[in-house]
Image (cartoon, grey):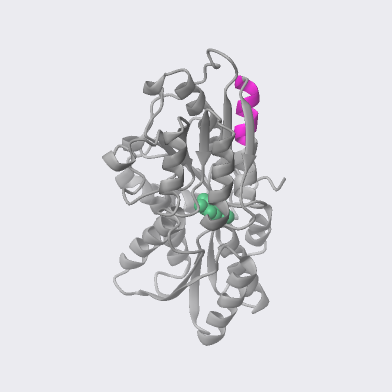
């Protein structure tokens, strides 16, 4: 799918205008970060093997990513397999990575569950001669910049611009709050690049209100919707005048939305929902959440296979160090458009 490219400076304004007009829903990657055309040629020699190691099992975001990778692998004649931990935890993901390294695939696409803890294990894979690609999350302290000398062994980082996504979500909620009031953030755990950057983007939006919006707290739910619901319920009870909540991923937003609905505060407390599983769309239609920020995980999966094939073919010029995927912003006004419907995550 081709989107119009916006300048990064005007992007937020354009997105908000688009939301108001309910016309355009696609947020394309900024031109500065735009990548060269992806490699789509089939493998030159014997069929290569590519593994995808996702962040956690049963998460619609990764289910959709795996579907994209599997479809592209089939198209290009690549042997493909995927695995991931039962919980979003490096202690559970590293043994899976080690087991995959032992199978000697040609390339691994991985959503690292921690920016630091996965550096050495991923380095081991690289040292074993495996091409390494980050999907969704990045590792290290360079903000996902894999041209930095300490991380230049990583082939590419494919994923959303998460600072931008956090800013879009929180700007929309601040606007729905009338530009003022108390704000709360539900997020997963420290050390996860994606949600950390979404919080950073949200903080930018809050700071831009010059104190009119006050952040009263942020809780870590360990990627667990039930815990997110419990924590949010406590915050709602202690702050009857809370105006808005940002749920930084699928489970954070699911828990926050459940708590708002259970407290009978639907439509009173505004909720920004990062990620787009089917239940978020139901919550949007029922007024429980006000904006759904759909990432493009299917495309992330497709690109991981394309870049892996390019690497196996020695075609490194076709692999950008950073490939930002865009967003589809879903509101009540555009939820029934074909584009919005297409961006809803798969559940199996
Ligand atoms: O938001 C996605 C992903 O981008 C993040 O890194 C972890 O959580 C999700 O998988 C959604 O649950």
Q: Nearer the viewer, residue 254 or 181?
A: 254
Question: What is the quadrant of the C terminus in the image?
Answer: top right
The main secondary structure of the magenta stretch is: helix
Residue at left offset 43%, top offset 59% = 191
Q: Position of residue 246 (x, y in %)?
A: 49, 65
Residue 319 occupies quadrant: top left
Is 311 within the magenta? no
Residue at the top extreme, as displayed: 44
Residue 133 at what x, y percent from top left?
Answer: 46, 36
16 and 256: which is toward the camera:
256
> In this view, which residue lies farthest toward the right?
348
- Let me know if residue 4 appears in the view: no
Vertical arrangement, residue 62 with respect to residue 319, above or below = below
Q: Where is 70 relative to 231, above or below?
A: above
Horizontal relation, residue 148 to residue 189: left or right: left
The location of residue 3, given as percent across then percent down, is 47, 33
Q: Nearer the viewer, residue 315 or 150?
A: 150
Give percent across and percent down for residue 86: 64, 55
Question: In the image, is 144 to the left or to the right of 44?
Answer: left
Q: Residue at x 57, y 49 (%)?
A: 95
Region rendered in magenta: 68-76
Residue that appears at 56% across and 61% down: 290
Quadrant in the picture for residue 282: bottom right
Report the residue at 45% width, 43% height from top.
122
Residue 129 appears in the rendering: yes
């Amino acid at each position: 799918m081709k989107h119009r490219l916006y300048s990064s400076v005007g992007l937020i304004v354009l997105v908000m205008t688009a939301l108001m007009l309910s016309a355009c829903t696609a947020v394309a990657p900024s031109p500065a970060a735009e990548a060269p055309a992806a490699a789509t040629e089939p493998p030159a020699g014997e069929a290569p093997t590519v593994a995808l190691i996702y962040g956690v099992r049963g998460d619609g975001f990764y289910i959709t990513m795996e579907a994209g990778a599997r479809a592209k692998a089939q198209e290009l004649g690549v042997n493909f397999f995927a695995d991931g931990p039962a919980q979003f935890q490096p202690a559970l993901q590293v043994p899976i990575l080690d087991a995959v390294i032992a199978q000697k695939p040609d390339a691994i696409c991985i959503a690292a569950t921690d920016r630091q803890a996965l550096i050495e294990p991923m380095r081991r894979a690289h040292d074993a001669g495996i091409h390494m690609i980050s999907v969704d999350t990045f590792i290290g302290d360079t903000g996902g910049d894999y041209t930095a000398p300490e991380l230049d062994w990583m082939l590419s980082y494919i994923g959303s611009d998460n600072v931008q996504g956090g800013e879009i979500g929180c700007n929309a909620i601040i606007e729905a709050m009338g530009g003022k009031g108390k704000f709360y953030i539900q997020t997963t755990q420290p050390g996860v690049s994606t949600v950390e950057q979404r919080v950073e983007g949200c903080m930018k939006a809050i700071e831009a209100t010059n104190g009119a919006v006050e952040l009263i707290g942020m809780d870590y739910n360990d990627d667990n919707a039930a815990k997110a619901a419990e924590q949010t319920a406590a915050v709602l009870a202690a702050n009857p005048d809370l105006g808005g909540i940002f749920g930084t991923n699928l489970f954070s937003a699911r828990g926050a939305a459940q708590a708002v609905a259970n407290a009978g505060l639907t439509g009173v407390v505004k909720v920004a929902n990062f990620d787009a599983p089917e239940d978020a769309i139901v919550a949007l239609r029922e007024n429980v959440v006000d904006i759904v920020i759909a990432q493009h995980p299917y495309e992330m999966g497709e690109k991981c296979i394309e870049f892996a094939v390019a690497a196996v073919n020695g075609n490194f010029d076709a692999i950008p160090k950073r490939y930002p995927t865009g967003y589809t912003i879903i509101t009540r006004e555009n939820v029934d458009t074909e584009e919005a419907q297409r961006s809803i995550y798969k559940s199996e």
